[in-house]
Amino acid sequence: MDGARPAGREIDERIQKHLAEEFSDDWTVLGLSQHFRREGYVKIPNIVPDDLKADVSAEVYRILEYSQRIDTRLKATSNTPRRMSTVGAKHITEHGTVVPELYHSEALMGFLARLARDSVVPCPYEPERYVMTKQEKVGDTHGWHWGDFSYALIWIIEAPGTEVGGMLQCVPHTDWTKSDARVHDYLVKYPIRTYEHQTGDIYFLRTDTTLHRTVPLNRDATRIILNTAWASAADIARVDSHETMDALFD
Ligand SMILES: [Fe+2]
């Protein structure tokens, strides 16, 4: 799937052109980078052109038919809950075109590398590259966790109003010790930031050192996201395990 695809270059060119126009001011980009590095999070809804965002959204809705419901707790993150439907990367690779192609966009990875001040490269572990989640029932949540790889763009395909829940909560600059995650100790120790999003938002998240979750839905409502994840140079050099991913994404 890493081979050359003509349509992939087309998407890459669209992103490159858009970024050159939208983020021509270095001071603006520096501000986004500093926000990202301070908070582990920065919202950038205009990181891709609107027409590409619409293409992504249409593809996500189409591939959601392959979703599987999970309701579990994960030991490696202090038994925090996962109550949602998920679509694994293999379904997106098999049935998608837009997402797999934008994932390999050099322009997009290059811009994210400017924000992160780090190399941003495709995850060597393919099931981590892109996944979808859908929450719809009261109590649905993606409980407190970290990512196996450093960087993710989260595409908010559909979000309910903030009064319903589903907001992102973050505790940046924390470390995941899989054998002793101590999630509640981190919640006690450091402030929690809460971010609301609406349909069409996109945010860049430092997933390996930002403890994060979604606030449980307080009634039945729809929240759909696409998660595209990339690795850092340090990730590539490290051998790791993937037990949380393997438990969640078919
Ligand atoms: Fe996450």
Image (cartoon, helix red, strand yellow):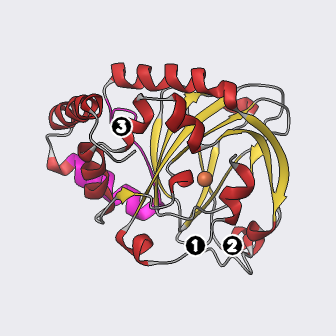
Q: Amino acid at mark 2?
A: Tyr
Q: How many marks?
A: 3
134 left or right of 240?
right
Separation (CA) of disc 1 from disc 2: 7 Å
Q: Earlier in the sequence, mark 1 or mark 3?
A: 3
Q: Is residue 33 magenta?
A: yes
Mark 3 lies on residue? 102
Residue 230 in the image: x percent, y percent?
43, 55
Task: State if disc 2 and disc 1 touch (CB < 8 Å).
Answer: yes
Question: Of helix, strand and loop, which one carries label 1?
Answer: loop
> Does the residue at mark 1 contact the one at mark 3 (Cβ under 8 Å)?
no
Q: Secondary structure at mark 2?
A: helix
Task: Indicate the position of residue 62 as horizontal and vertical percent values.
Answer: 58, 20
Task: Give x and y (percent) for residue 115.
Answer: 30, 56
Query: Horizontally, is 111 left or right of 89 in the view?
Result: left
Picture quadrant where residue 15 is located: top left
Specify the segment rendered in magenta: 28-48
Check disc 1: other Cα within 10 Å, few if <14, some if 14-19, many if 20+.
Answer: some
Instruction: Give whichever of 135, 248 is nearer the camera.
Output: 248
Closer to the chain start, of discs 1 and 2, is 1
Residue 66 forms part of the magenta stretch: no
In the image, residue 161 lies at what x, y percent? Answer: 66, 26
Residue 217's place in the image compared with 148, above or below, is above
Residue, disc 1: 174
User: Which residue is the site of mark 2?
Assistant: 186
- In terms of secondary structure, where does tag 3 sit? helix
Mark 3 residue type:
Leu
